[in-house]
Amino acid sequence: MSKIIAKSRNGKMLKIGTDEKDATWYFLAESVVKFVETGIKIGDEVTIKYNQSGGKATINYITKGKGESQQSKPASTETKSTGFTCEECGAELKDGKYKKCYTCNQKKKVGGYDKSSPTETKINEYFCEDCGAKLKDDKYKKCYTCNQKKPVGGYDKPATGTSKDNLIKREAIGHMVSRSLISLQGHVEPNNIHSLIKEIYATYLKLIDEK
């Protein structure tokens, strides 16, 4: 007595057998996909006819009820299934090295790495750690907009023991630099932001010291 043990997420495969231990995954021909989707559920007893080719068993006839499953066109040689299937869509895998097929695996690539691979493989995608916007390369961790919300200092922090007047001057210059960068937003290459901060800071410092 064969019954439906499981369905794949994409609705194009069925796991059939007397129990979980001896069940086998079958692909579905397009002609039976709709019927299986609406008329067959997990636990139903079924009778099937299928083709076996290249290690791939494809059901081309299925009905509810007890009966002996038949192979429609027996092949002279059969290749045993690998026994490994994609955990997302149920597609058969070549071996057990990966848990997902290539198509499902591509959907999971984020943050510049393929997270489903046993050894992370670098891909040419980099993202802002704050908002997730795509970056040109991995030179910076944040995009220009997020960096302006919390600028990465282009100058040294005041050293311990710095006079109060010196601290006030540094803070004032820092504020002027920030305002200048805001006014230049959209006209500045993000990859040159650090050198630009230093140049603006040095210019304001020189102007103040000349007074």
Image (cartoon, grey):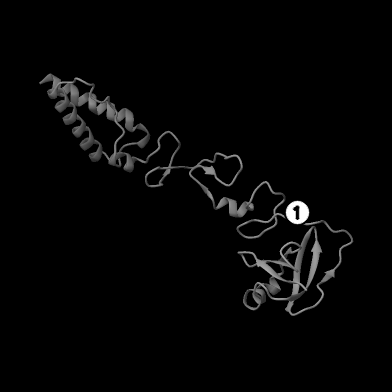
The quarter of the displayed image where residue 33 is located: bottom right
Q: Position of residue 161 (x, y in %)?
A: 19, 20
Q: Nearer the viewer, residue 150 or 162?
A: 162
In the depicted structure, whether residue 67 falls above or below residue 89: below
In the depicted structure, whether residue 25 falls above or below residue 49: above
Which residue is found at the position 71% from the left and 64% from the top? 20
Type of amino acid at the residue the image marks with label 1:
Thr
The quarter of the displayed image where residue 165 is located: top left
In the depicted structure, whether residue 139 falls above or below residue 43: above
Q: Position of residue 50 (x, y in %)?
A: 79, 69
Secondary element type, mark 1: loop
Which residue is found at the position 41% from the left and 47% from the top? 132
Q: Is residue 108 left or right of residue 20?
A: left
Q: Quadrant of the C terminus?
A: top left
Label 1: few (<14), some (14–19) or many (≥20) C-alpha neighbours in 10 Å: few
The residue indicated by pointer 1 is 82
